[in-house]
Amino acid sequence: MAASRAPEPTEPLRQTPLHGLHLSLGAKMVPFAGYDMPVQYPLGILKEHLHTRAAAGLFDVSHMGQAVLRAKPGIDIAECFEQLVPGNIRDLKPGQMRYTTLLTGTGGIIDDLMVTRPVAPEHADKLFLVVNAARKAVDFAHISAALGDRAELKPLDTRALLALQGPAAAEVLSAHIPQTESLGFMQAQRIEIDGADLIVSRCGYTGEDGFEISIPAEYAATWAEKLLAAHAVEAIGLGARDSLRLEAGLCLYGHDIDETTTPVEAALGWSIGKRRRAEGGFPGAAIIQKQLADGPSRLRVGLALEGRAPAREGAAIVDAAGQKIGQVTSGTFGPSVGGPVAMGYVDSAFAKPGRTLAILVRGKALAAKVVAMPFTEKHFHRND
């Protein structure tokens, strides 16, 4: 899950608790989802990307929406929340987290989000949510309205969120928080250390091993500086975050997914629990179950282009006869891949890996091949 880019704001930009640190590190700041955010640091996007793949990168993702959803007495919070998403929330064990999607009545994606069941028994009536920055107001209003008096949603506006990603992330973080070493991919733990109440999750949106650290805002800068003091860690901006998630084949809300796309069309069928596929009971279930059974009319695919020129969002995808059969939704030069990569939607008949198509870039048809995603190998840590 990644925060979507948003139009230029008309209101003053908000600042994360790390804003001053970004400026002191020489970051180039840009408007993003209503916040003043670092797009890159003096190291530059290409080197920031490669450093994250080789060592560890620290990202400020405090603009994302964090919230606790708490059931009213007598209500099962997981069963309640399952009425809004197709993910299997009821079977989440304490300390487990899951990627899922909020859906419209026609199966369109309102947002993609992370849902965590807390470890402590006294918090069994709660779920911890992290949603995209540009959608948090929409999401929180939707959840509150849909669940009514069965649950209360409390945004955690006084918390920051750091992401430490890369093969050195575990060694760096465990030097400060030894408990994190035992976490497996998609597991979370609440840890109190040096007076700070942290929620540490082993997850991320780069395709690498890593962690997200939810932390009270007043402790954020201190912890960021502590992590950046490690030789292996560099500050990484939104530019490299975008190229990293694209190489990992991960969706960006507002570009690769939105309310006009279903999870099946978006190749996110894996996020729909087996029990949920059979039972339904979530918005748009009939449409999604039909797409699962018969196949969707279009599908999100990975595209590898010949040459060095990247295809950008909106570029037409055409068949051998020059007929438009789809459109690029994300595209860039993949620093780890060493060539341009893209994602887009094509008519399902053209979605099979190995199919040669073309993408129109500046009026020229560039050869592109449909490829399986991710474009680079993922390195998630699992406790098998």
Image: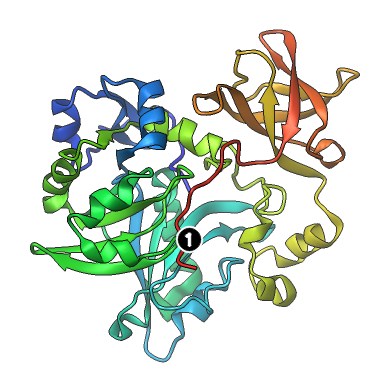
In percent of width and height, residue 326 lies at 76, 30
Above/below status of 207 relative to 12:
below
Judge by depth and name the residue closer to the eye, 382 or 317.
Answer: 382
From what the image shows, is residue 108 above or below residue 377?
below
Q: Residues within 10 Å of mark 1 (few under 14, many from 20)?
A: some
Compared to 353, does 49 lie above or below? above
- Among the 4 quarters of the image, the one containing residue 127: bottom left
Percent across and percent down for residue 74 are 42, 91
Work out whether residue 34 or residue 101 is closer to the camera in this orientation and state it: 101
Q: Please give the name of the residue rendered at 54% of the width and 60% of the height, measured from the top-left corner.
A: 100
As shown in the figure, which amino acid type bears the numbered disc 1? Answer: His
- Residue 157 visible: no
Residue 286 in the figure: left or right of residue 253:
right
Give the number of marks.
1
Q: Is residue 189 visible?
A: yes
Residue wearing tag 1: 142
Residue 291, position as x, y percentages in the image: 79, 57
Residue 337: image location, x then y, percent: 56, 27
The local secondary structure at tag 1 comes to: helix
Q: Residue furthest left?
A: 194
The answer to whether 67 appears left or right of 384 in the picture is left
Examine the rendered structure and indicate whether residue 300 appears above or below residue 209: above
Report the side of 62 relative to 375 (left or right): left
